[in-house]
Image (tube, grey):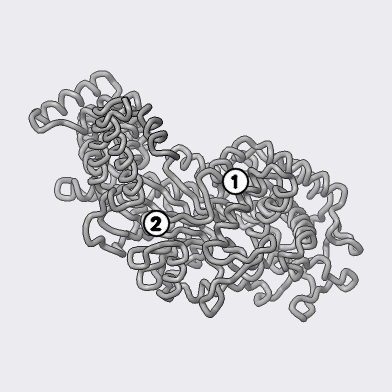
Amino acid sequence: MDDMKYLRLLAKHYKSQEEVANRIINLSALKSLPKGTEYFFSDLHGEYQAFSHLLRSASGMIRTKIDMVFGKTLTSDMRTQLANLIYYPEKTMEYRRKNNELTDEWRRIIIYQLIQVSEVVSAKYTRDKVRNRMPEEYRYILDELLNVTDDINKDFYFNEIINAIIDTEIADAFICELSKLIQRISIDQVHIIGDIFDRGPRPDIIFNELIKFGEVDFQWGNHDISWMGAALGNKTLIAVVLRISMAYNNFDVLEDGYGINLRPLFEFADRVYSDNMSPKFIPHTLDNNIYDTIDVNLAAKMHKAITIIQLKLEGQMIKKHPEYNMDDRNILEKIDYTNMTVVIGGKEYKLMDNDLPTVNPDNPLMLTEQEEELMEMLAVSFRHSAQLQSHIKFLFKNGSMYKKVNNNLLYHGCVPINEDGEFISINIEGEAYSGKALLDKINDIVIKARYATASCEKENALDYLWYLWCGPNSPLFGKDKMATFESYFIDDANLKKESYNSYYTIFAQEKICDKIMKDFGIDTKLGHIINGHVPVKIKDGESPIKANGKLFIIDGGISKAYQSATGIAGYTLIFDSHALRLAEHKPFNPTGDNTPKVQIVKQMSRRVNIADTDEGKKVEEEINDLRKLLHAYREGLIS
């Protein structure tokens, strides 16, 4: 765009020299402030209680601030009580109310303490930024309390305001809102490095929390992609997400969270499948359903019914797309239905479960008429779930295959690479892609699955989402196969093993991390890769820190399904203006102490200011444009 044309457009926002100068001054001041605190989470897998606590507590950093302010004046128990009030203000206030512990003196002391914590956590932000995070109804009072000038008798001023808050009987609500303000300003940006869905009970509640928080981005994981495809009507992926939900007894998220009508599946499974159910289809009950309790045997029938449908639809998908090179996973067509055996990898295996009433040996992949009708009804239910569509829209809008931010490269799974350390070249639509170019191409395909207007283009993109879920060269899956069939029907542990891409055996080498970072345009001296997908088994001596601190694997098992393997309950990586910190979490205990163990993994050589960040670069560009506008005003080029 012509410079003068652009400057005239800019002048519509800044109508005088004075307005331009003020904006330049404000932006210059902003650059000198410390950077905001970024939080990196991965593999949340529906664990809404644990994640909500991490968000409310800023992964233990709020407790650190409390200890810093009150370490010499309050006992440890008193500091714990203050922290719990900040994390759960409504619950704490209700508990104190029931026990007649809400006195005016307690309110006065707590408000004063909360103001002190607020001052510390808000110190590095502009007044405008803090004000924007304040609840509107208390904005004036909070602004006054947090910004008392030195020429005022601070104690007297505080006492007068706090007394007025108590006298007007708004103290309880004010305490709750002040606690929430501390939560909101303790975290500047949240990065979710994949996999909000599956295994845990309520991913929908996690989405509600993140939408309310606002400053969040996603790097899609394969479990996210499967739900994105299901919400768009891909019947194969609908079967996938339903099977996993049945496997982990997650009925509440389907019916209460998203309003998915499961009655057709319930009736079909109960009618078609016998009561003599294989133990493989009994759900893993990690969390009890609150709203939708299902009889275990009936849940097993539903689980098996949707599993068989999934295997059929996956076989159809594989035949439709020979370019996926996944014929070895079309197992239903390889079964000898007379002897109930199957040959896999050159070896014959006996099926553990012979009850396949809907499978036609002459055409194993064909859905029965009842299955077709069932899947059509389920697809309608997924497409018409307002809550699900809202969450998936948020995931598309704020998500991508990877993100580069402040010299950190974020992605969920892997960059496909061979054992020699060379990027694997993958053919998509007749062209070869590898490394960053591969992830960029896949990102385009994912976007087309939602937004393409040409029906053929949209259909192919939507099919590709299934490949991203389980394909052998999918950067989101990163394994040679998804052993779904073997897990249910074959009694051989070796056959169920899913082998990881070479990335996971050589990513601890600095040269491999440097190669990846260079390909993505990250400074190898300053940068890091932040990765999820693979649980770190700390109890077996594994470390989340790889390649001399250049790569962090932060899937530590926030999902209950993995905690027995990892020995902990996940990690949070925290990047503030002073350091990179790694918080190691214990399994969440709703009534116990959940303070994590936090270690500094990289101390910054000097405090990092906004000028040093990606945001700072944008601010500098805006300042340069405004200087040109100021010059144009002064030269009379714009009046």
The numbered mark at residue 500 is none
Q: Position of residue 130 (x, y in %)?
A: 29, 36
Q: Is residue 344 left or right of residue 465?
A: right
Give the quarter of the figure containing the N terminus: top left
Q: Nearer the viewer, residue 318 or 559?
A: 318
Quarter of the rendering containing residue 542: bottom left
Residue sitting at 67 percent across and 40 percent down?
A: 260
* Residue at numbered disc 1: 289
Quarter of the rendering containing residue 442: bottom right
> Residues under labels 1 and 2: Cα distance?
28 Å
Other-residue count near label 1 (Cα within 10 Å), few / some / many at <14 / 14–19 / ≥20: some
Residue at the outermost top position: 168
Q: Position of residue 284 (x, y in %)?
A: 62, 57
Q: Nearer the viewer, residue 574 or 280?
A: 574
As helix, strand or loop, the secondary structure at mark 1 comes to: loop
Give the quarter of the figure containing the C terminus: top left
Residue sitting at 50 percent across and 45 percent down?
A: 398
The numbered mark at residue 572 is 2
Q: Position of residue 404 (x, y in %)?
A: 43, 56
Q: Nearer the viewer, residue 39 or 171?
A: 39
Q: Is residue 101 left or right of residue 226?
A: left
In the image, which is nearer the foreground, mark 1 or mark 2?
2
Q: Give the total number of marks visible in the rendering.
A: 2
- The disc labelled 2 sits on which kind of residue? Thr
- Up the image or down, 440 lies above or below 69; here it is below
Q: Is residue 129 visible?
A: yes
